[in-house]
């Protein structure tokens, strides 16, 4: 495999290289500060599963390409084997008889980057590199959105049955078979038939659902006790560290579901809604078609179309309390803000006093007897329009075209990493198009 450490050292007379440099993908490549990103990783790519042969630049490039192309891991590697432009982008050119056969390389790359890098540090590097391409740096727009995870819609019955299947079929029955011991008595087969009957019904009444939940809680409690007894007698034989961690999650789910039988959901904190993604929390958004979303809530700031993350968390938070910190973060990167666009949830008295003290003009509804002047009304409506169109448009573009519609990877850090690369890939395309527009000469009309 031929390595291309830097494009400036590559043969500039190659036709393919010329086509790549003048394409949008080549312009996106030139807009990314590769040396600064590579410096965030250790010099020697060592450790379990480290894809050292691909190189640090190649790892970052593949993460950008996955978001840019909006494809799965397998489709990305299959296209990499046949598309020389993607090979140029990553700095690796395959020979005619070479191809990547390891389809788990992207999983190992994500695991390696999340171990050695924080997305906050990578974002700071990219913003400092791109801030020279920002024109209206005094205008700050902010809003919050939710990047959903790829899970089935969670219900208490589904969650309890998943836990029962894991305890009995995946662990207890398997361990008893491997150790040659007798299975403990349980009603798992009877409850499996009852679960099939329940799930086949088109609609179930509240009483039927409550009866099903009570039966599954009782079955899960008994399964946990039996599995724990078998593990204690055999000194934990049959379970690895990952299974022990999952067993702890199952115990916590059982406790929560037992609490929900007699208490309203509002009294339960840190409610687990997925067995395989226990870090997810229900995010109440209040939308008409989707009142509750399951994923990471992100507070996004935008300056002249350039979006960056202020806060990214799987627990719900009130975005209006982030206004002061967001203004401080904007001042650190772009200088003081003079105009601010946000929706009405940000228009608290504390935020109004802060903006007045900092001499920041906002689009908040006017309070008090003093009316806005005609020029101020025009400016306020323009800021509101930019927030409602440009800001919301960026959310839709990222979710539809940069792989942020449903996050399919598992792991809290990995999901945040995918969200980060999706947003930054959209920024890189925006910067590349702006630079290309500046370099291209204006069209002249013929006389």
Image: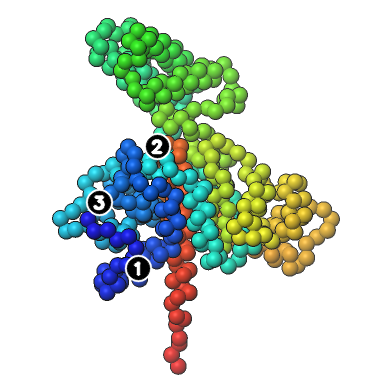
Q: Contact, CB < 8 Å: mark 1 with mark 3?
A: no
Mark 2: few/some/many CA within 10 Å (<14, 14-19, 20+): few
Query: Can I make out residue 237 in this image?
Result: yes
Q: Are marks 2 and 1 in contact (CB under 8 Å)?
A: no
Q: Residue at x 39, y 62 (%)?
A: 29
Mark 1 neighbour density, 10 Å: few (under 14) some (14–19) many (20 or more): few
Disc 3/disc 2 C-alpha distance (Å): 22 Å
Say whether disc 3 or disc 2 marks the residue closer to the N-terminus.
Answer: 3
The quadrant of the picture occupied by the C terminus is bottom left
Residue at x 36%, y 54% (from the top left corner): 57
The disc label shown at residue 8, or none: 1
Element type at marker 3? helix
**Real-space CA distance between mark 2 and mark 1, rounded to the nearest whole angstrom:** 38 Å
Q: Position of residue 259 (x, y in %)?
A: 54, 18
Q: Which dot, 1 or 3, sits closer to the camera?
A: 1
* Label placed on residue 350: none
Above or below residue 82? Residue 167 is above
Residue linked to disc 3? 78
Mark 1 to mark 3 CA distance (whole Å) = 27 Å
Residue found at the very far bottom of the displayed protein: 447
Q: Which quadrant, please, contains the N terminus?
A: bottom left
Describe the element under mark 2 as helix, strand or loop. Answer: loop
The answer to whether 230 is drawn above or below residue 77 in the figure is above
Per the image, the residue denoted by label 2 is 410
Residue 104 falls left or right of residue 70: left
Whether residue 208 is visible: no
């Amino acid at each position: 495999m031929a390595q291309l450490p830097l494009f400036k050292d590559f043969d500039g007379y190659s036709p393919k290289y010329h086509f790549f440099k003048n394409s949008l993908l080549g312009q996106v490549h030139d807009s990314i500060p590769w040396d600064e990103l590579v410096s965030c990783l250790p010099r020697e790519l060592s450790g379990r599963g480290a894809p050292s042969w691909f190189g640090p630049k190649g790892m970052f490039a593949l993460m950008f390409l996955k978001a840019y192309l909006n494809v799965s891991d397998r489709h990305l590697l299959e296209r990499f084997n046949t598309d020389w432009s993607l090979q140029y982008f990553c700095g690796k050119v395959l020979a005619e008889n070479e191809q990547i056969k390891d389809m788990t390389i992207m999983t190992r790359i994500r695991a390696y980057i999340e171990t050695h890098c924080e997305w906050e540090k990578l974002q700071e590097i990219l913003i400092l590199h791109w801030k020279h391409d920002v024109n209206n740096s005094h205008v700050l727009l902010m809003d919050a959105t939710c990047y959903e995870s790829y899970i089935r819609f969670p219900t208490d019955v589904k969650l309890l049955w998943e836990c029962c299947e894991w305890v009995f079929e995946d662990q207890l029955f398997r361990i008893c078979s491997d150790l040659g011991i007798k299975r403990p008595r349980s009603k798992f087969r009877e409850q499996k038939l009852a679960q099939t009957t329940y799930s086949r019904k088109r609609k179930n009444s509240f009483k039927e659902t409550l009866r099903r939940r009570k039966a599954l809680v009782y079955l899960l409690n008994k399964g946990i006790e039996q599995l724990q007894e078998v593990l204690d007698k055999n000194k934990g034989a049959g379970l690895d560290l990952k299974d022990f961690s999952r067993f702890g999650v199952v115990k916590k789910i059982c406790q929560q579901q037992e609490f929900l039988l007699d208490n309203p959901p509002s009294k339960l904190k840190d409610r687990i809604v997925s067995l395989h993604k226990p870090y997810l929390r229900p995010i109440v958004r209040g939308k008409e078609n989707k009142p509750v979303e399951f994923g990471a809530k992100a507070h996004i700031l935008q300056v002249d179309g350039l979006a960056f993350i202020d806060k990214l968390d799987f627990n719900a938070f009130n975005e209006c309390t982030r206004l002061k910190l967001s203004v401080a973060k904007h001042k650190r990167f772009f200088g003081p803000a003079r105009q601010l666009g946000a929706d009405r949830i940000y228009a608290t008295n504390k935020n109004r006093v802060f903006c007045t003290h900092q001499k920041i003009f906002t689009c908040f509804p006017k309070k008090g007897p003093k009316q806005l002047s005609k020029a101020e009304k025009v400016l306020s409506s323009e800021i509101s329009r930019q927030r409602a169109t440009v800001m919301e448009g960026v959310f839709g573009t990222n979710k539809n075209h940069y792989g942020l519609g449903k996050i399919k990877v598992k792991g809290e850090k990995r999901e945040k990493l995918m969200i980060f690369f999706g947003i930054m890939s959209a920024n890189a395309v925006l910067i590349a198009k702006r630079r290309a527009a500046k370099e291209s000469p204006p069209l002249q009309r013929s006389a």
